[in-house]
Amino acid sequence: MRDDKDRSGKWMIEHHGDGILRLGGVTGFRAWRAAQAEVVQPRQLPDGLLEVFFPDQEQPDPFLLEIATYPERRVEEQVLRDALLVYLARRTLPEVITLVLHPKGSFRLTGQQHLTSRHGLTQVACTWRVIELWTLPAEDLLAANDPGLIPWVPLTRFDGPPESLIQQCRDRIDQQAPPEEQANLLAVAQIMTRLRYNDPGLLSLLGGSRMIIESPLIQELMAQTRQETKQGYVIQLLEARFGAVPPEVVAELRTVRDEERLGELHCFAGLCPDLDAFQRRLSS
């Protein structure tokens, strides 16, 4: 569930990042685009980085977007780390927005993180904007008439029956979203709805399992999962035979997407005489 949420959230950032900016209270921009992240290690990538153009600026401003399923303490460290990564790569401190999807326990993100070195000579402080979806009125998001906001609506505050809310989401996507995006938006809406409601009847209002299967986004996510699993098998086999695998080999292997090629590399990982031979085959 979390993996689906993470990847669908990144799809929303890449395709409907303007809606998330508006959720964060950012308005007045004339254009935006998803930026290619410079950091190459997947575990260190922020959820999304947007380049946002404002009328009075020639160059875009970087906006770092983080989507947290729950308000967990580790998110604060992650936001600070990602903000510093963007600063190191671009020499510009990004604007940061954290979107928290669902409450859990009593802890809430403060949007503040402070670090002090061991001897106290250095301090780093960071503050940013936190948006808790369950505090936003569903009516406000629906009134925006932006289909890119609809998948977030099931997680917002609504006083009526959930069936009414989910049906409104379905109607808005059917009526307002471009035909080529409807299946993906319905699939993402289902993923977000499952986070709050464990009710197959509600999911059926958004197309149910048929829509999930037909969604190009979900098909892509399934393909990525298969690829990452095969990549993991190759790494595990190399580690079992030769010990730690150099980071540059892991990074290059992560770029291999063809499943047949990954199968060949898995076989060779069990036969190659050493890591150098594997790396030569990988680079060939």
Image (spheres, grey):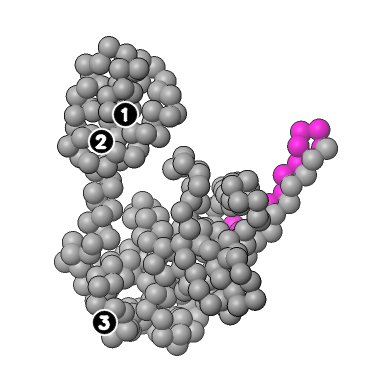
Q: Which residue is mark 3?
A: 174
Residue drawn at point x = 40 percent, y = 34 percent = 251
Most extreme residue toward the top is: 273
Most extreme residue toward the bottom is: 143
Q: Is residue 103 visible?
A: no
Return the mark for residue 283. Answer: 1
Q: Is residue 168 left or right of residue 135?
A: left
Q: Earlier in the sequence, mark 3 or mark 2?
A: 3
Residue drawn at point x = 33 percent, y = 33 percent = 253
Q: Is residue 119 left or right of residue 97?
A: right
* In the image, residue 61 above or below residue 89: below
Q: Residues within 10 Å of mark 1 (few under 14, many from 20)?
A: few
Report how far apart the C-alphas of labels 3 and 1 lie in the structure: 46 Å
Q: Give the x, y percent position of residue 151.
A: 37, 72
Return the mark for residue 140. Answer: none
Q: Which residue is mark 2?
A: 230
Q: Residues within 10 Å of mark 3 (few under 14, many from 20)?
A: some
Q: Is residue 226 visible?
A: yes
Residue drawn at point x = 22 percent, y = 41 percent = 258
**Boundaries of the magenta span:** 106-120
